[in-house]
Image (cartoon, rainbow, N blue to C red):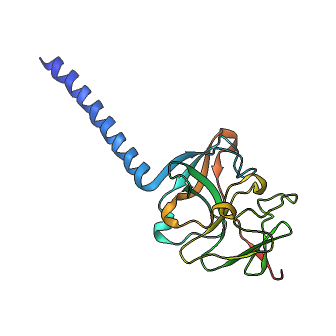
Amino acid sequence: MDSLKSVFGVFWDFIEAIVFALAIFVVVYLFLFQPNQVKGGSMYPTFKDGQFIFTDKVTYRFGPPKRGDVVVFRSPKNSEIDFIKRIIGLSGETIKISAGKVYVNGALLDESDYLGLDVNTGPEAALGENQEFVIPEGKYFVMGDNREHSSDSRDFGPVVPSEFVGRVFFRYWPISDFGKTETPQYQITQGS
C-alpha cells in the first residue's frame, strides 16, 4: 500500500509540475511575449523569410511606439494575418516620398542603419510621388524594409495601435541569427 501511495505521490507531483509550467506559459504567451514567424520578404534584409522572433506585448502599455520600432500587427485587410513592419511616421507628422527617399515633416529620414544604399522607396497607390500625407492622431505610418516588395501604409494607410500585437525584440531561429533586435537612432536632415 505504501508503494502505491509513493507512486501516486510521484505521479501527482509530476501533474502539478506540468500544470504549473502550462500556467506560466499561458500567462507569458497571453500577456508578455509571443513567438511569431516572419513570412515573406517584406522586411529583408533586417528579417528573413522563415525566421522566428519574439514579440514584446508589454512595452506599449507603458509608452507610445517610437520611430524605428519593428512591430507585428494584424493586417488592416484581414485580421487573421499578422504583418511585420517598421514604424516610419508618428501621429501628426507629415510623410512624403520623393525620388525614392522618405521625408518626415519636410526633413529627409536617414535610414542608412537598416536600408542598403540601393533601396528605392517608391510610392504606392495610396501615397503618390511627392504627395504629402498627414498621419492622423492615434495612428502610425509603417513600411517594410524591402520597400519594392512590401504591402504597407503606402498601400493600406496608417495603422492604429490597437492592431499591434507588439514590438519585435528578439530573433531566436535560426540559431545563426539569434539575438536582440535594435531600434535605430534616426538622423533627420532638413530640406526636401
Q: Is residue 69 left or right of residue 59?
A: right
Where in the figure is residue 78, as x and y percent of width and height?
53, 52
Q: In this orientation, which residue lies closer to the viewer: 28 or 153?
A: 153
Where in the figure is residue 16, as x and y percent of width and height?
27, 36
Pick the quarter of the image with the C terminus: bottom right
Where in the figure is residue 105, as x and y percent of width and height?
72, 81
Q: In this orientation, which residue lies closer to the viewer: 52 or 98?
A: 98
Is 53 above or below relative to 65?
above
The outermost residue toward the left is: 1
Image-quadrant location for residue 3: top left
Q: In this orientation, which residue lies closer to the viewer: 153 or 86?
A: 153
The outermost residue toward the front is: 125
Residue at point 36% right, 40% down?
A: 22
Q: In this orientation, which residue lies closer to the viewer: 92 or 112?
A: 92
Residue at point 53% right, 74% down?
A: 138
Is 138 above or below relative to 121?
below
Residue at point 20% right, 24% down?
A: 8
Q: Is residue 149 left or right of residue 14?
A: right
Residue at point 71% right, 70% down?
A: 185
Q: How many marks?
A: 0
Pick the quarter of the image with the N terminus: top left
